[in-house]
Amino acid sequence: MRNLLKLLTVSIMLTSALFAQEKPPADVRFSAGLLDKSIDPCNDFYAYACSKWKAQNPVPADRPSWGRFNELQQRGEYIVRDILEKASADRPGRSSNEQKIGDYYASCMDESAIEKAGARPLEQDFQSIVAIQSKAELPKEMVRLHREGTDVLFGFDSGSDFKNASQIIAEVDQGGLGMPDRDYYFKDDPKSVELRKKYVEHVAKMFVLLGDDPGKAAAAAKVVMEIETGLAKGALDQTSRRDPQKIYHKLSNQELAALSPAFNWTTYFEGVGAPRFDSLNVSEPDFIKNMQEVLSAHSLDDWKTYLRWHTVHNNARLLSTAFVNENFDFYARTMQGTKELRPRWKRCVGYTNGDLGDLVGQVYVQQTFGAEGKERTLAMVGALEKALGEDIKSLPWMGADTKTQALVKLQAITNRIGYTDKWRDYSALQIVRGDALGNSQRANQNDMKRRLNKIGQPLDKRDWEYPPMTVNANYDPNQNNITFPAGILQPPFYDNHADDAMNFGGIGAVIGHELTHGFDDEGSQFDADGNLRDWWTANDKKQFEERTGCIKDQYANFVAVDDLKLNGKLTLGENTADNGGLRIAYMALLNRFAGKEPAPIDGLSAEQRFFLGWANVWCNNQTDALTRMLVTIDPHSPSKYRVNGPLSNMPEFREAYHCPATAPMVNQNACKVW
Ligand SMILES: [Zn+2]
């Protein structure tokens, strides 16, 4: 989901007005005072647990949403700002790492220099585009743009071979769109039609900022829209992209060339510095075939217009205020409903984390992550794995052969907690004080080189997807491992001072969620070694699909906003993981009690507190615009359903809160996979 991540972290702009007044965030621990006693937990548990928090925590003007994750993220931002400010003081004896993160941050914060430069930092990029003589030169130009981090035409990267996961191969993927997903180009409801109109206006405004006269800019924006709509025709939607069979096509270099003879792949691969290879994963051959048609349907001048747009679009965040504001206006205000630009320091903390994450992360973990945190988390992971094992053994619908395979897979999961054992190498990267945009482009070049150098190499399991201050967690089906960065191992997910029930409902259920991903509609197609291989008997697979079908239908009936319902198929994996994760965390909690029920706290039983622990991490407010956007591109359900969906399927919840059988929080047709 590179698109999604990129879009959400790039929604950006200016004003440092908030900077001085902002105070570090309040404590994020759970307190019983937050419960809304006027709401029956059996009617709407999410409202019972979160409505008070929601009333006290409106969406800040500079955000499209605000939830407990964000409280945690914000705390991390203050820690990182402190690290970066210290490193940016130019003093003798700074280490090379301090120079890099400090000067990167200082350059980003130097608003007046950035303001003075306007769009000049892109001058060379534009000259290079103007100088293209023929379409045959496009591959060479794409090399330059891709290395700088500009997304044009298609994506090129390295990744595990789906069917031979220990081997890293080259990957060509769809790409080159300015809107978040192919569906944005074709949906014909009034809101989508309006959004397309605004997108074209936005592209035109950016051209005007580059000095084009308005008439020429409007014509150019139309060309961009035509090309992108053409590319989008061949692209897959987010639901299809969750099916590994649809995005794995191992082709020889000759087969790739035959799909798009007009594009010289050899020139591109050599130029971009990829090690030699004979075959690769062309995730979506139809996209490449279609790309060839779009390439020939448009003139060279049209392509130059398209490249010029993506150049300014991808770099806007580090240009002068006018570009930053216009970029904010479309991507954050119109698309996500955000009212104000985030303060500059927060944006610069985000960019530094994005471009130099492992350098910042090394200092971050020294300051925040002790051995105790790692030990206790590992113990909890062990407890959850044990519970999942017991669950698998007791499943009434799964046969003995498949169970054996599932247990082998569970045993083989690797647990990565806190931070990586192998930090990324930035020694060749030059960070120059005063060159904010250049620093970011060079960081992208350095990172692309790192990723492409893996092609042809065996998988290195020490490579982490993101730096340790990230508030997130993941399961990688190709590596069969789970990753919990230090950033998430804090309250309210995990609290040294909280009781077991709260911690198992918080981080415990999140661990369970990640483990269950190995067994959701996507993860279950990969085996213990991370290879795409069917290890199920036909009958067990049928039973599994019946059960996941129940979850798909249940969630497809939930309303996200207005009359827009959730996409049951897009969210199936995440919903399965929420349901399974919560259930095995509950089993693990009972194992921990070993028959000895702890005394209630604040008048709440341990079982009741467990479900509050889960609800508590999902309290969240967000704009309707963002909800609308996420329904199309986000495989996760909105917070309310991440809480009420799984709980309504659990008899354990019903019992803990003494709900009558007919209560809204009791699903008459309860779904259960794991
Ligand atoms: Zn997940």
Image: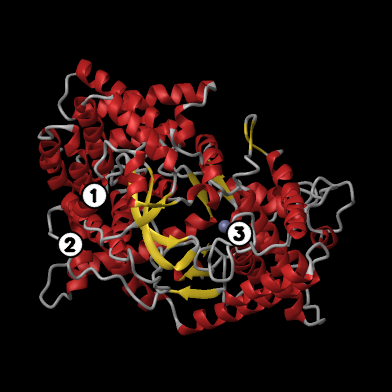
Q: Residues within 10 Å of mark 1 (few under 14, many from 20)?
A: few
| Vertical placement of residue 381 versus 44, above or below | below
Q: Given this view, does label 1 or label 2 mark the residue nearer the observer?
A: 1
Instruction: Measure how far apart labels 3 and 1 are at the Cα level.
Output: 33 Å
Of callouts 1 and 2, which one flags the residue occurring earlier in the amino acid sequence? 2
Give the quadrant of the C terminus: bottom right
Query: Is the CB of the residue bearing disc 3 within 8 angstroms of ligand 1?
Result: no
Type of amino acid at the residue the image marks with label 1? Thr
Instruction: Identify the residue shown where x is 77% and y is 58%.
Output: 539
Is residue 633 found left or right of 435 in the rendered image? right
Numbered disc 1: secondary structure: helix
Type of amino acid at the residue the image marks with label 3? Gln
Which label belongs to residue 525? 3
Quadrant for ligand 1? bottom right
Query: Is the CB of the residue bearing disc 2 within 8 angstroms of ligand 1?
Result: no
* Marks 1 and 2 in Cβ contact (< 8 Å): no
Numbered disc 2: secondary structure: helix
Q: Nearer the viewer, residue 401 or 460?
A: 401
Q: Which residue is mark 1?
A: 266
Is residue 262 found left or right of 340 in the rendered image? left
Q: Which residue is mark 2?
A: 103
- Find residue 260 and report its horizontal and vertical position in percent: 32, 38
Instruction: Identify the residue shown where x is 72% and y is 80%.
Output: 592
Query: Is the CB of the residue bearing disc 1 within 8 angstroms of ligand 1?
Result: no
* Marks 2 and 3 in Cβ contact (< 8 Å): no
